[in-house]
Image (tube, grey):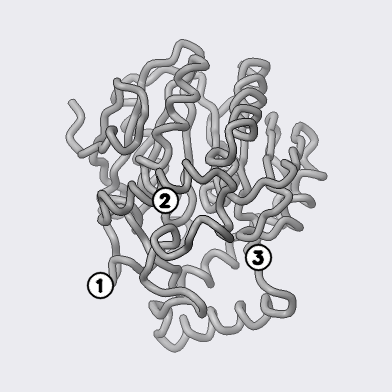
Amino acid sequence: MPNAPLFNDLAQGPDDGGAYWVTASDGVRLRMAVWPKGEKGTVLLFPGRTEYIEKYGRAAAEFGARGYASVVVDWRGQGLSDRPTPDHMLGHVERFSNYQNDLAAVLAKLHELGQPGPFFLVAHSMGGCIGLRALTRGLDVKAAAFSAPMWGIRFSPGVAPLARCLSHGARVLGQGQRYAPGTNGATYVKIAPFVGNVLTRDAETYAWMQNQVAQKPELALGGPGLHWLDEALRECRDLARLPAPDLPCLCFLGAEEKVVDPAPVAVRMANWPKGRLELVPHAEHEIMMEIPSTRRRFYDLTTALFAQSS
């Protein structure tokens, strides 16, 4: 039986959802959710940094309408999963490889529940970084779709070398739990108005995200710590050296992307033999939460790929 809270009134996912507490191999307690009905297979939905299960309820509903079950996890340090620092709003992970421990716990629970395959990967932003690493380690999925994957972090011109030095230096000096410059403990959608936001052009979806963290502030997360930033930059650099996984892949990137660095995405997809890059005109960072026509194209193309790859 489900034993963790799932705020499905806020998530607006399918009615059959349930959430579970699972424990990673290093003792971290995590929350995961399963919307189990889907005759065509199960989608592993990997959220980005700051995100939480309920933000993907509508995505689960879209996949459910197309015949796919969905699984979502609160990564460690996010949502209702254990948060490792005294400041619970600080984005932190000790090692990026720890996220693979989270994934292993989720997969073990799915096996225990008897959730049927075939399995497919859909990964957004930081989840795209975690997902790519998992694929290089043999994650058993038939195909993958990425939304604005964090295979690099976007900085202003000339800032990237400074960010690398600052984040690493702060870590060495024991200051890694300071917020990265320009960020603080406030979650983005609470402080940024819709006009000029970097996530979506869809006002209704933006208001929906704002309402979620207003109703359940315990789900929210603020800016990243310098330790997290150092780990993220290292992981992106390491992944860039690896060959593309041998499976079908679609990667969606908004033409107005301002959060992740588009350049490593373009390079990766140009060298992914079974992959294709879909550049989405006018879209921002959140492809799955963009205007209706963009969302519909994402889900239609993604599930078409899954059907061809089953």
Q: Does 26 appear above or below 67?
A: below
Q: CA distance from mark 2 to mark 1?
A: 19 Å
* Tag nearer the camera, 2 or 1: 2
Q: Does 224 appear above or below 62?
A: below
The three-letter code of the residue at mark 2 reads: Glu
Task: Examine the image and state in which quarter residue 14 appears.
Answer: top left
Can you identify the residue that label 3 sits on? 154
Can you identify the residue that label 1 sits on? 86
Callout 2 touching callout 1 (CB < 8 Å): no
Q: Does 187 appear above or below 304?
A: below
The mark found on residue 51 in the picture is 2
Callout 1 touching callout 3 (CB < 8 Å): no
The three-letter code of the residue at mark 1 reads: Pro
At a point 57% along the width and 48% down the height, the residue shown is 200
Q: CA distance from mark 3 to mark 2?
A: 19 Å
The answer to whether one can see residue 238 in this image is no
The mark found on residue 76 in the picture is none
Dot 2 surroundings within 10 Å: few (below 14), some, or many (20 or more)?
Answer: many
First-in-chain label (1 vs 3): 1
Coordinates of residue 258 in the picture (x, y in percent)? 65, 60
